[in-house]
Amino acid sequence: MACSLEQRRSWIQPHHPRVSVRRQCALLGLAPASFYYHATPESATNLRYQRLLDEEYTRHPFYGVRKMTVWLRLQHHAVGPKRVRRLLRALGLMAVYPKPHLSLNALPHKRFPYLLKGVAVVRPNQVWSTDITYIRLRGGFVYLAAILDWYSRYVLAWELSISLEADFCVAILERALAGQRPEIFNTDQGVQFTSGPFQAPLLAAQVQLSMDGRGRAFDNIFVERLWRTVKYEEVYLKDYRDVPEARRGLAAYFPFYNDQRLHQSLDYRTPRAVYFGSPP
């Protein structure tokens, strides 16, 4: 099973008597810089602006830099478009495209066409999809990835990460595939999903790979709706202090989402009931 970047980093012993940090990094598949590097945190003011931008973007994903700047000024915040543009870029948010643009891929990784245009999704495990979003903390942001069954809206696996390394996406994929497999798996064209380690288990299971078109706002609409639900019903209400608190909060929320939350689009049944075929 794939281990996350944080897990591998935690195994390094800086004062090991015989094995240097550089050698430990090599054995764990880490760049030495990833162990020593510590990002410079944003100021408290910029973090507050990022939180406001994240909330407003979730409500109105079509707002660009100009409208976001005006909106912040209407909330009595003295900001200019240059600062707003930088903060939106730091969050990976882009107007009209209603998702964090987390993973621009300029590498020659394997891409696949979008297979779901006009396709009727009529059964569980016909289509799965995945995506990554930001989860805000009081002192910054972390990344959340999840795998969703389109027909039932059932969340098959999820994970948090402090970085955008592909490892945590591979880890949730392995957990999801341990129980079932889809006919089609849809992703965006991000580097996490076009990488060999992510695609290999799907291809080995003879799953058809589908990828969103560039700038296509609604190719992965069900995951987009999941992110809105998670943020409004859990993240914004709880205001997590740190990563452990976020992990505990989401670990409690996703069972509620799967097992108890009634979905109007599912005739007021739960995702679990639809996914596992319980009668309405």
Image (cartoon, rainbow, N blue to C red):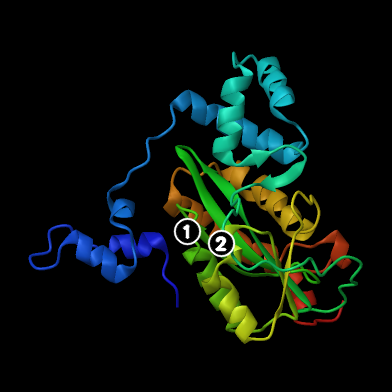
- Is there a contact, CB below 8 Å, between mark 1 and mark 2? yes
Image vertical order of residue 189 relative to residue 68, above or below: below
Q: Secondary structure at mark 1?
A: loop
Q: Position of residue 267 (x, y in %)?
A: 89, 66
Q: In which quadrant of the rendered view does residue 96 lie?
A: top right
- Residue 175 visible? The answer is no
Q: Position of residue 140 (x, y in %)?
A: 47, 39
Image vertical order of residue 75 relative to residue 195, above or below: above
10 Å crowding of disc 2: few (<14), some (14-19), many (20+): many
Q: Position of residue 257 (x, y in %)?
A: 68, 62
Q: Secondary structure at mark 2?
A: helix
Q: CA distance from mark 1 to mark 2?
A: 7 Å
10 Å crowding of disc 1: few (<14), some (14-19), many (20+): some
Task: Give, as a three-letter code, the residue at label 2.
Answer: Gln
Q: Would residue 110 be found to the left or right of residue 4 on screen?
A: right
Q: Would residue 160 be found to the left or right of residue 79 on screen?
A: left
Location of the N terminus (image quadrant): bottom left
Residue under the image location 57 percent in, 39 percent down: 91
Task: Give, as a three-letter code, the residue at label 1.
Answer: Glu
Image vertical order of residue 197 relative to residue 69, above or below: below
User: Residue 67 or 240: which is nearer the viewer?
Assistant: 67
Residue under the image location 63 percent in, 79 percent down: 202
Residue 192 is marked as 2
Q: Which residue is mark 1?
A: 165
Residue under the image location 15 percent in, 62 percent down: 20
Number of numbered discs overlaid on the protein picture: 2
Residue under the image location 60 percent in, 74 percent down: 199
Q: Earlier in the sequence, mark 1 or mark 2?
A: 1
User: Residue 42 or 251: which is nearer the viewer?
Assistant: 42
